Image (cartoon, coloured by chain):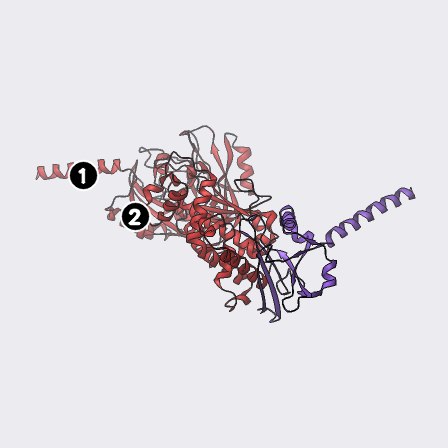
Chain colours: A purple, B red
Amino acid sequence: MNRLFLVLLCCLLSLTFECVAQEKVRQNIYYKLDSTDVKYTKYVSTHTSPYSKNKFTLNSFGLPCDCHIAGYLSFSGHTNSDVGDTSEQAKTISVNSYKKMKLISFNELVKLLREHDLDFNKLYNLYFVEVCKQRKDKYVVYNVKFRNSFVDSQ
Amino acid sequence: MKQTNLLWLCLALLLFSCSKDAENIAPAAQDNSLISNAMEHFNTSVLTGTAVEAQTQSANSNNYRHNIIKNAEWSNAKTVQLSIGEAVQVPLSFSKELYAQVKNSPNKLALSSLSYLLMYRNTRGWQTEVVHRLPDAAYLANTAINKSFTGMVLVENWQGNFIRGYSYDGNGTVKKLLAPRVKGSSSETQVMYEMPSYECNKEIDWYTCSSWECHYSYTETICSWTGGESGGGDYSGGSNDDGGGHHDGDYGDGNDSGYPSSDDYSDAPLEPRKVEVAVIPHTTITYNPIASCIYGKLGPGNHAYDKFLVEFQEDSEYTVIFKLQDNLTDYRGYPANGTTNYTIGSTSITILINSSRLDRPSWEVAGTFVHEMAHAYLAQKLVSIGGPGNLKQYAENTNFTDLFDYYSKYVKIIDNKHVYSPEENSSAQHNLMADKLITDIAIGIRDYVEANTPEIKNHSEITLEQYKAVAWNGLRETGAYTSLSTEEQTEIGINTTILQSFTVDRCI
């Protein structure tokens, strides 16, 4: 009887851990922005929140794509904690760190976006990597979210 | 002299025969003396309590409808021709409006639009009746001009005591009704057991409404005599002003009785102001905290509501219902954030919002509501003319010029025989919205955001361009969008993200 109870308890605990793990872990994926590959647009700005008057940054990217009815894929990340759904602050990394990253291609990114569309931001933690304009041996990493899902019809 | 008298007699006969032909239609030149006499009698006898009806005991005090103060609008009184002769019909207003929910129909009808005061003279003197005409769903759905009335008529005296009532069905059968009982009152049970020859299957649900939402108030249950035209009667009290005949139970059909027939009530032109509150949230909306919060900020004062739904308020012939639905799809089977559904010939337009997509930022969901309101605005116009097939006839009317232009351009066939597919309607309407209504949609979204987070109002970095960017959602398969340059299209994306970084996601 005790053994049966223990087996059931183990099953229950393993299920709970699995659920928690699924909820919390988002897979990091990295895509390198390269104008020769995809002619992207970038908008980086600093603003003042109208609520707390704190400064926040906004990084917004548009990647042209025939795959989407809008004609582009929209990504952005902001740090305005007053409104929620924030992203990490952009950071500069070294070449060594860059080399450790497993980058995905544009086509792979589009495939993932298509497959997971509405759940993409729940499943993946997307980073755009760009060569630093001031120092070519450094890279800037932007944490962004997919903003224009393929469900465009109202 | 005799010749002159004969001439007057002929003239009088001619006039009567004309008024018979134009049955129940108010003549241009009113019989002012009859109206004046009726008003004098009303003011001096009915209101002051000298008329017998006014001395009868109060009507069923359980019935909230009877306790509302009525006012006869004599300035709009008119004469009508009944089978028993000429009568005076006076619109009524009420100190508090009640709305009757029509069974199997989304329509709620204002009591004041259903009720009128009827005064006529017979051998017993002036008679005063308050007539309530409650059409059924079939009547409201029927768009024929000369349709026969179907539904119920309740005739009461000024105090609310029941005199007589009729129900009219679609095949011409008229049944006599018993006095309505407020549901739950002890009298209802009494009727069920003591009157086996009556069936009590009719109900009127009454609502009180604000300009934005309605709340259930109570139900009246009505029994009808199953034996057809015979029998029936009044169980509530007398009605005649002179205290003579017209006893309880006197249905007095026809000329001989001196009282109006059932046809007199069904033939009277129904000119309801219909639904004054025509925008109704379904319980799926009101019970959902996210949807009800967003919906609550899109009411009067929001530009989209005032622009797109005001037609429902003023014309009040159409009802728009907001409802949530899981896993909503569009006509192609693709996931949709919202859809607007209507049927030509119906008076209701239903906006469905995808409950599976309420986890988006609230301003995006509000954008879906506003987008669908714009569809409802166009749908209401199309329904009012019997569908896009009739647009050609209304092409010169400024209310329909745009619709005619866009249906001509994107559907090409403007023909009543053509069956307009959802794809054709979608194409014509979305292109019209992108070209002509996008600013209105954007202002509607802005009004929502500013109602949700007033801090953002007049912020120097947030302009209408950001709201317009959101308004493009759902309008990208249009000529207006595809004609934009790649730079302009990506600018729309950036503007959306700017708004997102400034705007609180949740509805507060």
Q: Chain of mark 2?
A: B
| Amino acid type shown at disc 2 | Ala
Question: How many neighbours does mark 1 have within 10 angstroms: few (below 14), some (14-19), or many (20 or more)?
Answer: few
Q: Chain of mark 1?
A: B
* In the rendered image, the vertical position of residue B253 relative to residue B384, given as above or below: above
Quadrant location of the C terminus of chain B?
A: bottom right
Q: Nearer the viewer, residue B62 or B220?
A: B220
Tell me: B20 left or right of B433: left
| Amino acid type shown at disc 1 | Ala
Q: Are marks 2 and 1 on the same chain?
A: yes
Residue assigned mark 1 = B12
Residue assigned mark 2 = B38
Camera sees residue B162: yes
Camera sees residue B58: no
Q: Nearer the viewer, residue B106 or A8?
A: A8
Badge 1 element: helix
Where is residue B429 shown, x and y percent of the image? Answer: 44, 46
Q: Nearer the viewer, residue B95 or B431?
A: B431
Where is residue B405 shown, x and y percent of the image? Answer: 37, 46
In the picture as drawn, the residue positioned furthest to the right comes out as: A2
Where is residue B141 shown, x and y percent of the image? Answer: 43, 38
Chain-order first, disc 2 or disc 1: 1
Q: Residue at x 45, y 58 (%)?
A: B303
Badge 2 element: helix
* In the rendered image, the vertical position of residue B267 relative to residue A102, given as above or below: above
Quadrant location of the N terminus of chain B?
A: top left
Q: Nearer the viewer, residue A37 or B149?
A: A37
